Image (tube, helix red, strand yellow):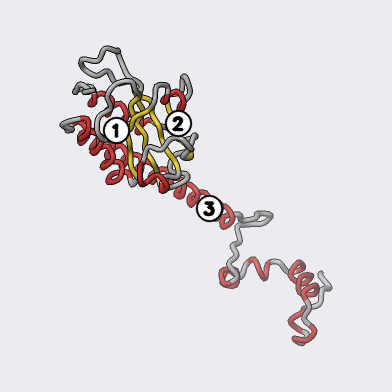
Amino acid sequence: MSTATDPLSTTEDDLHWPRVRDWLQAHPDLLTEDRSLLEELGLKSTGPNVVDFGKAALTRLEEAAEREADARKRIEAIARANFAAQTQTHVAALDLMEARSPTDLSRRLDGVAQGRFGLVGASVALEKPGGVPFGWKALEAGGVDALLGDHGLTWLGPNFEGLDLFGAAEAEVKSVAVIRMAPHFPGSETPARHAICAFGSPDEDGFTPSMGCELVAFIARVVERTAERWPILS
């Protein structure tokens, strides 16, 4: 028979946790069989020598579910942004293909860059010798290689000295995407001429080297093929 003193027989001033703990260890049934008290304390008795981890396990499951929900929301947001960008790109391509002249093509390109993609603007530049359409920028011979390198096809990153393709808005351009083109104009003595299509963003991280360039390259190809409709007059 236990000789532990009943702490309930003492005064409130004499109650101390070590004594209460010892008494509960000596009389565990008084606690484990009192279901109403256990419920009030947020505890659950599942049997002798059994520890109920239900609440902790449920908490972990809820945390995992929240993480998965957040990840799913981020993926869905990225997917929606990509779909919107692709849609805008396809609409822009249709607009460019309706151009009536090289000058109109340049104007439309700048318009879709600003109106559909929120950019500062876009520009087309063509190397000499040979005529350069009104509204296009002229580059000296070798100018494309000087900007992109002998074998460079694209550049995405900060705006750099010597590009100068955005006119009065040049100071607003913080990052650029530059795509090499090689349009073949009807009646030209040379098979193709070196050219570039450039897009300027007002944000420093608008275009970065780590980005994919599929959409801007697609727009550049549309510009290139559309420009081949018309001969370039000297």
Between 184 and 91, the one nearer to me in the picture? 184
Amino acid tagged 2: Trp
Mark in front: 3 vs 1 = 1
Mark 2 lies on residue? 155
- The answer, for residue 73, to whether it is visible in the render is no
Quadrant where the image shows the C terminus? top left
Q: Which residue is mark 3?
A: 63
Front in this rendered view, residue 8 or 118: 118
Residue 72 at what x, y percent from top left? 43, 45
Task: Give the x, y percent position of residue 77.
Answer: 38, 46
Q: Amino acid at mark 3?
A: Glu
Q: Residues within 10 Å of mark 1 (few under 14, many from 20)?
A: some
| Secondary structure at numbered mark 3 | helix
* Residue at left offset 20%, top offset 34%: 94
Q: What amino acid type should be assigned to the residue bearing mark 1?
A: Trp
Quadrant of the image occupied by residue 104: top left
Residue 21, position as x, y percentages in the image: 76, 70
